[in-house]
Amino acid sequence: MDKKILDLGNKKGKMLLFGGVYSNLQALQSLMQIAQQHDIPPENCICTGDIIGYCGQPKETLNLFKTWGAHSILGNVEIQLRDDQDDCGCDFTQGSRCDGFSEIWYAFAKANLSKSSLEFFNTIPDHIIFNYAGKKIGVVHGSYENVSHFVFKSTPWIEKHSSMMALDASVIVAGHCGLPFVDQKGSQIWLNPGVIGMPANNGKIKTWAMVIDDSSGFEFEHIQLSYDYLTAIHEMKKNELPYEYATTLGTGLWDNMEILPDKERLSQGKPINLFS
């Protein structure tokens, strides 16, 4: 299938970049408040995909996202739901804990989204491109080639460079891996804003997003998001979703690290240094 790429043209002013809402309604509500505080309109807010995921309010979260009017690209979860598939397409190892947990939350999300909600995913592009502060920026979920590609800070640069070449972009904004980071080689930059729906395995309950600013060239800043995580935990438990993921919301630590390379695995529970 040909990739659908949405060209937003020239963008100006502050922009809010984020990913992995993961059916976490409370986190999305808090993010929208941040957008208001920074005077960032919905058309300057971009999600890197996976609006739907681990948490307990998929219908409510998607309805709020649609009402808000922010942009998004397709995450692997949206693609699988759109195509009526039986798994989340996260590329977890078969038989792993992540694989087993995903069977539960994905089935719950699929059962709780209406036909009109699923049809909404047909309107979302695979990628977004736009010009900003003299740079061409491309938005991917995993990578250009593979929506489920786990790209981390430690991932070899050649794997990142291929997405830049494919979109003719000097900056890539990506999601999927769940961890915020910055990786720069010369004038090329790979930015992962992090996700808002789950903590970043650093022992803190706050989640992550990013604001970019063109007032003095191309500037970017990761921001941390506080939200009503106790209600999010309650909604997960009420709907009998994986207890281990609900626990993560309250501890900031992942239940398992099966997807992580060694460098990221050894960083569990440690402060996140975005530039090291």
Image (spheres, rainbow, N blue to C red):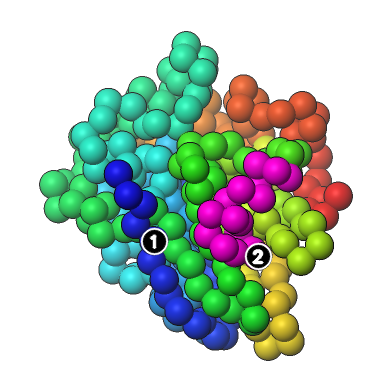
Give the quadrant of the N terminus: top left
Where does residue 150 sit, x and y in percent of width and height?
Answer: 58, 37
Q: Residue at x 51, y 31 (%)?
A: 245
Where does residue 193 sit, x and y in percent of width and height?
Answer: 62, 57
Q: Is residue 92 above or below residue 172?
A: above
* Foreground of the two, 158 or 231: 158
Element at label 1: strand
Left or right, 208 with respect to 24, comes to right
Q: Is residue 9 above or below residue 264?
A: below
Q: Spot the residue most to the left.
A: 115
Where does residue 130 sit, x and y in percent of width and height?
Answer: 50, 73
On the image, numbered disc 2 is attached to which residue?
Answer: 170
How packed is label 1: few (under 14 Cα within 10 Å), some, or many (20 or more)? some
Residue 72 can be seen, yes or no: no
User: For residue 39, which numbered disc appears in the image?
Assistant: none
Mark 2 or mark 1: whose residue is earlier in sequence: 1
Left or right, 204 with respect to 96, comes to right
Q: Residue at x 37, y 32 (%)?
A: 88
Left or right, 212 with respect to 54, comes to right
Q: Magenta residues: mostly which secondary structure?
A: helix
Q: Residue at x 65, y 65 (%)?
A: 170
Q: Marks 2 and 1, how far apart in space? A: 16 Å
User: For residue 5, which numbered disc appears in the image?
Assistant: 1
Where does residue 109 sit, x and y in percent of width and height?
Answer: 29, 37
Residues at marks 2 and 1 touching, judged by CB atoms closer than 8 Å = no
> Does the segment drawn in magenta span residue 160?
yes
> Does the segment drawn in magenta span residue 242?
no
| Residue type at numbered disc 1 | Ile
Instruction: Give the magenta-colored segment's residue range.
Output: 157-172
Q: Spot the residue most to the right.
A: 276
Q: Residue at x 59, y 41 (%)?
A: 177
